[in-house]
Image (cartoon, helix red, strand yellow):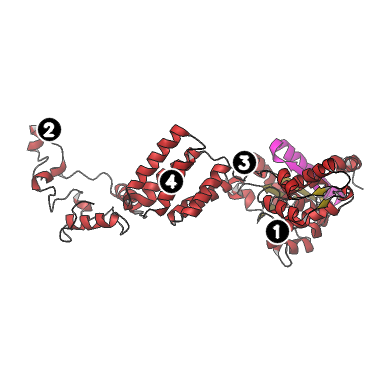
C-alpha cells in the first residue's frame, strides 16, 4: 500500500470545512457527465473524449478565459484515469519544487505503480528554467502534465514544452450551459444551494447567464450573493428576481490583459474594422478597449499610424483629424476625450483607403540594402565652392521654377534606378488626382485639367 499523502491526511478536514468554500468550489463537477461546454473536444467521438474512454490521456495545455472549466476538467481527468492529482500554482513556483514533485512522482510510479497527473495553474508564469525542468519528466511519461493558462501558449510556453503537449482551447460557456450549471447548484442539497429553498425566476437565471459572459465562476459567485440577499431580506419566502440578480452581477470586468492574446485580438479587430470602412464595428472595438481599461493614448497612437499607413494621400486630412484628436484628448482627458476619439475613429473608417505609402517605405529600403549607397548623380550634387564646380558638381542642373514649375525630362534617381517607381498612387480619393498629375509630370499623358491635387 502506498503511504498516506497530504491529500488523504487532510481530506476529512477539507470535507468538514467545505461549507465555508465558495460556491464554485463546492459544486465543482466530480465526473465527466457533470461538465458542461467544450463540446468541440469533449463531445462524442472528439479527441479528448476518446482519450478519456481509452485511458490514453496525453500531456495537455488548457488555454482559455477564466471560469470555463480548465481546473475542473483537470481534476475530472485525474479521477477517470485513477491518477494521483497534484495541483500546483505557478505563481509561487520554483525549480526546486518542480524537481521535488517529479521525484515523488517517479517514486510512486516505480514503487506503487501509481501515475501522477500534475496540474499547473497559470503555467504562463513559469520562466524558461522552470518550464525546462518539466521536460524530462513529460518526455519520459513520469507525469502527465496539464498546464492551464489564460495567455496564448504560443507566446507564454516555450517551444520545447509546447511540442510535447496538445493544446486545447477552452471557449466561453454558452448561456444555456451556464443556466444548467446554475440550476444544478440550486438543486444540490449537499454541496450547493438546495437547502436554502429559494425560488429563482427563470428570467433572472437567463439574465445572469448572459451577464456572466461565459464565466461560470463569476456567475456562480453572483448567484450565491443573490440567494444570500434574498434570504436576508425575505427569509420566509425568499425570491431571486431580475432586480436581485442585476444588483448581484452589477459589472463584470472585461477580459483584456493589455499585453497578451486578448489585447492583440481586440486591437486587430479595431484596425481591420476601420480598414474595412465599418465605423460601427470600429467604435465597438475601440470602446471595448477603453471600457476594459486600455490607455486611450495607445488607441490614439494606433489611429495616428492608421491615418498614414491605411489612408495616406487618399485623404491627407485624415492625419490632421487624428493629430487634432490626440491634442484635444491630452487637453481635456476622459470622459469628454471620448468625443474627439470617436470623431477620429469614424473619420478614418469612412475615409478612402490607400496603402501606397507602405510600398513607398519598403521598396526604396530594399533597393538600398540590395545596391548599397549609390553615388549621387553629379547634376544633383551641392557645389558651394569653385573646386566642386570644376569637378562638375551641379553642372546642367535645371531649376524647375525657371521652367514653369516642372523641368520636364529631368532625372533625380541614380542611373541604376532610373524608371523605378516607389510611390504608386491608387485610384481612391485624392490619390486618383495625384496619379493623373504624376503621369503628366512623367510625360506619360497630357496635362490634367487641374494641375494641383
Residue 17 figure quarter: top right
Q: Is residue 83 toward the left or the right of residue 301 in the image? A: right
Please name the residue that numbered disc 2 is placed on. Answer: 384
For label 2, the SS is loop
Name the residue: 46% across, 53% down. Answer: 279
Residue 391 figure quarter: top left
Magenta segment range?
Answer: 85-114
Q: Is residue 47 toward the left or the right of residue 284 in the image? A: right
* Lower position in the chain sequence, tag 4 or tag 1: 1
| Residue 305 position within the rendered picture, expressed as x and y whole percent measured from the top left | 40, 45
Closer to the camera in the image, 233 or 268:
233
Label 4 and label 1: CA atoms lie apart by: 40 Å
Label 2 and label 1: CA atoms lie apart by: 76 Å
In the depicted structure, whether residue 41 falls above or below residue 5: below
Please name the residue that numbered disc 1 is placed on. Answer: 38
Q: Is residue 42 toward the left or the right of residue 434 in the image? A: right
Amino acid at each position: 500500500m502506498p503511504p498516506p499523502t497530504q491529500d488523504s491526511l487532510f481530506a476529512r478536514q477539507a470535507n468538514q470545512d467545505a461549507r465555508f468554500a465558495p460556491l464554485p468550489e463546492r459544486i465543482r463537477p466530480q465526473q465527466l457527465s457533470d461538465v458542461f461546454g467544450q463540446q468541440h473536444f469533449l463531445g462524442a467521438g472528439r479527441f479528448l473524449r476518446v482519450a478519456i474512454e481509452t485511458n490514453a490521456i496525453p500531456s495537455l495545455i488548457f488555454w482559455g478565459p477564466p471560469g470555463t472549466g480548465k481546473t475542473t476538467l483537470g481534476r475530472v481527468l485525474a479521477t477517470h484515469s485513477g491518477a494521483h492529482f497534484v495541483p500546483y500554482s505557478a505563481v509561487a513556483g520554483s525549480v526546486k519544487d518542480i524537481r521535488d514533485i517529479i521525484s515523488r512522482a517517479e517514486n510512486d510510479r516505480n514503487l506503487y505503480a501509481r501515475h501522477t497527473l500534475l496540474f499547473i495553474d497559470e503555467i504562463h508564469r513559469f520562466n524558461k528554467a522552470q518550464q525546462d525542468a518539466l521536460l524530462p519528466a513529460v518526455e519520459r511519461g513520469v507525469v502527465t502534465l496539464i498546464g492551464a493558462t489564460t495567455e496564448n501558449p504560443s507566446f507564454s510556453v516555450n517551444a520545447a514544452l509546447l511540442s510535447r503537449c496538445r493544446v486545447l482551447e477552452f471557449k466561453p460557456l454558452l448561456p444555456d450551459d451556464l443556466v444548467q450549471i446554475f440550476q444544478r447548484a440550486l438543486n444540490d442539497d449537499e454541496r450547493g444551494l438546495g437547502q436554502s429553498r429559494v425560488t429563482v425566476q427563470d428570467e433572472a437565471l437567463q439574465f445572469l447567464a448572459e451577464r456572466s459572459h461565459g464565466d461560470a465562476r463569476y456567475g456562480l459567485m453572483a448567484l450565491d450573493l443573490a440567494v444570500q440577499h434574498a434570504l436576508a431580506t425575505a427569509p420566509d419566502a425568499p425570491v431571486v428576481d431580475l432586480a436581485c440578480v442585476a444588483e448581484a452581477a452589477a459589472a463584470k470586468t472585461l477580459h483584456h490583459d493589455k499585453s497578451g492574446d486578448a489585447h492583440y485580438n481586440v486591437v486587430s479587430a479595431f484596425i481591420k474594422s476601420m480598414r474595412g470602412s465599418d465605423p460601427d464595428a470600429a467604435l465597438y472595438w475601440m470602446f471595448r478597449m477603453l471600457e476594459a481599461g486600455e490607455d486611450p493614448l495607445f488607441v490614439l497612437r494606433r489611429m495616428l499610424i492608421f491615418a498614414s499607413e491605411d489612408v495616406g494621400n487618399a485623404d491627407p486630412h485624415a492625419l490632421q483629424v487624428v493629430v487634432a484628436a490626440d491634442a484635444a484628448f491630452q487637453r481635456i482627458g476622459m470622459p469628454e476625450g471620448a468625443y474627439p476619439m470617436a470623431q477620429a475613429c469614424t473619420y478614418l473608417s469612412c475615409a478612402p483607403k490607400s496603402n501606397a505609402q507602405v510600398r513607398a517605405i519598403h521598396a526604396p529600403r530594399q533597393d538600398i540594402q540590395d545596391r548599397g549607397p549609390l553615388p549621387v548623380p553629379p547634376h544633383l550634387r551641392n557645389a558651394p565652392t569653385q573646386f566642386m564646380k570644376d569637378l562638375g558638381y551641379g553642372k546642367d542642373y535645371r531649376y524647375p521654377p525657371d521652367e514653369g514649375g516642372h523641368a520636364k525630362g529631368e532625372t533625380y534617381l541614380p542611373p541604376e534606378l532610373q524608371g523605378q517607381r516607389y510611390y504608386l498612387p491608387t485610384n481612391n480619393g485624392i490619390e486618383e488626382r495625384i496619379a493623373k498629375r504624376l503621369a503628366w509630370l512623367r510625360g506619360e499623358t497630357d496635362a490634367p485639367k487641374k494641375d494641383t491635387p
